[in-house]
Amino acid sequence: MKLKTDFLIIGSGISGLSLAIYLSKLAPDEKILLITKESLHESSTYHAQGGIACVWNNDDNFDKHIQDTLVAGDGLCDEKVVKKIITQAPERIIDLIDLGVEFTRNANGEYDLSKEGGHTVRRVLHVNDQTGQSIENTLISNVKKLSNVEIKENWCAVNLFAKNFRCYGVYVLNQESEEIHNIAAKATILATGGAGKIYLYTTNPDIASGDGIAMAYRAGATIANMEFYQFHPTCLYHPYAKSFLITEAMRGEGAILKDIRGNEFMEKYHPQKELAPRDVVSRAIDAELKRSGDDYVYLDIATQRDSNFIRNHFPGIYNTCLDFNIDITKQPIPVVPAAHYCCGGVKTEINGSTEVKNLYIIGESACTGLHGANRLASNSLLEGLVTAHECANTLAKEIHGLKIKEFPEWEPGNAVPSTEAVVLSQNWDEIRRFMWNYVGIVRTDKRLQRAKKRINLLLDEIDQYYWDFKIEKNLVELRNLATVAKIIIVSAISRKESRGIHYNLDYPNKSEMSRPTTLRRPW
Ligand code: FAD
Ligand code: SIN
């Protein structure tokens, strides 16, 4: 089926939904189609816990927030972008409040500000420990009221149609009818989130398979800084807990890390101890686990705060851990580091524009220059919101110069229904395992080269499968996952230093001539 729309938004996290809201207001006569590959709320946004960073009270100022962001970014942030995003934060937070987000208040009725690693002051607005759920639900209920926005769930973008650095639209798998639709648009905006599913252990939900980054790469866009995949220090360690994060805000409220024998260890690694930047804490835990051979370390809030405080501040974590028979008011929480956030992405301006005309990328899939070599906690919801706002302004201004142009229908060739689903699950497992072991928290040249050999073999196999068999969501995701894995490996090999989150034992120091890594097709 051939479809047309003025603006096509792909993804329903904070960036896609807030873009729909801003754009609908600025361009009320245009048709906006928002598609998402599962149900509307499925997104990393929904799972965000800690909150959203913003200069909010008199103890803080923009210079401090900018400085903390630059320090975390370890020399690779784009300072102009950092300033622009951080100084816009209060206005964008007010937008969220106006839409109905009820941030947690303290006993005086003021917004309660929490603290996370790398922040020198308390500046994180939150809704208890379920900030993302509250933001996502509020945005969804607002988008559903917009008359010029049409929503399609379970529509999975398969590939962009782009020629000579111009994007015409996208091929989409309608998972109910199993048809591939061809959607032509004046502008296509990818708000498809991160790629944590590339790693064996991740805090990310299943949707995070790097689809937008892989699609934009195939369309000719430049990809930047993909070696900087951030690992969160504290993901719940339990055989039945899938990807459950224990927020950094818990360390902000005094929780301490201990080995399983009860010894504290963070003072050996950084003067800020538990509140050191994330890369430092993740590497410290990794080093302790490698040294001891243990499977996990403990995060202990029980001995630091009384049980009422813990239950009131962290109700989501309290209840989830209780489901696994861990009472966090009485016991320490077993935790391990896990892949969490893609600091790199498609190279964009702050408004999401790319080198491919009519193609925009916003949110976690984009690399605006805000995060550099390591993201400061709670700056990503903010980036999604600000880039959505900037993107809406640009699209509304450019609307009259944009035209819908049709493109050929999907060519299924001789594809037949898949007979060997086992190939997909085997390849998927293999990638995630070697990415964790060879391209994880601590890297070496030898491990990276091993990973490169394996991904090249797998890419050939997956490509063959892609053309021979009928398209299904698993296959689309696996192909994208493999492409993004290769981009990460190639980027990591090209960085001959250790900086921010990228740590290579063969180059343990920083180079003086460091630049962002950029990569364009073919590799
Ligand atoms: P997402 O929210 O991930 O949304 C992506 C959307 O794209 C989804 O709807 C998905 O289904 C859709 N999609 C993907 N591929 C396709 C496709 N092929 N076709 C159609 N649709 C597609 N950041 C903070 O600032 N503060 C926090 O406290 C915080 N806590 C976090 C906790 C967890 C557990 C996690 C995982 C992340 C956390 N982050 C936090 C990071 C932050 O949540 C994300 O970076 C941010 O929500 C990304 O928003 P997004 O709109 O770019 O993508
Ligand atoms: C957390 O709550 O620890 C996650 C915050 C973030 O990733 O920004």
Image (tube, rainbow, N blue to C red):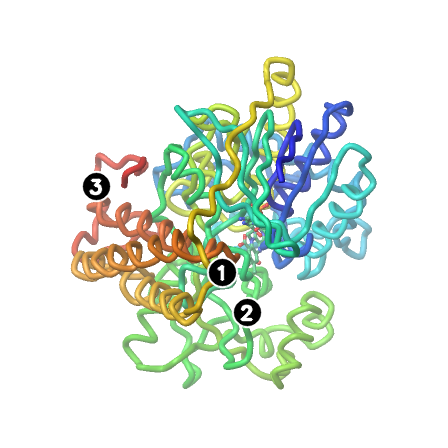
Horizontal placement of 46 versus 471: left or right? right
Q: Position of residue 410 (x, y in %)?
A: 50, 41
- Disc 1 versus disc 2: nearer the observer: 1
Residue beneath the point at 54% across and 39% down: 190
Report helix, strand or loop for mark 1: helix
Residue beneath the point at 68% across and 51% down: 153
Q: Residues within 10 Å of mark 1 (few under 14, many from 20)?
A: some
Which amino acid, mark 1? Answer: Asn
Residue that label 1 marks:
474
- Label 1 vs label 3: CA separation? 40 Å
Quarter assignment of residue 188:
top right
Residue that label 3 marks:
511
Residue that label 2 marks:
255
Earlier-in-chain disc, 1 versus 2:
2
Q: Position of residue 69 (x, y in %)?
A: 47, 41
**Does residue 358 sit above or below 120 in this rendering?**
above
Report helix, strand or loop for mark 2: loop
Q: Position of residue 234 (x, y in %)?
A: 49, 67
Q: Residues within 10 Å of mark 3 (few under 14, many from 20)?
A: few
Horizontal placement of 1 versus 146: left or right? left
Horizontal placement of 276 versus 322: left or right? left
Residue beneath the point at 54% across and 64% down: 251
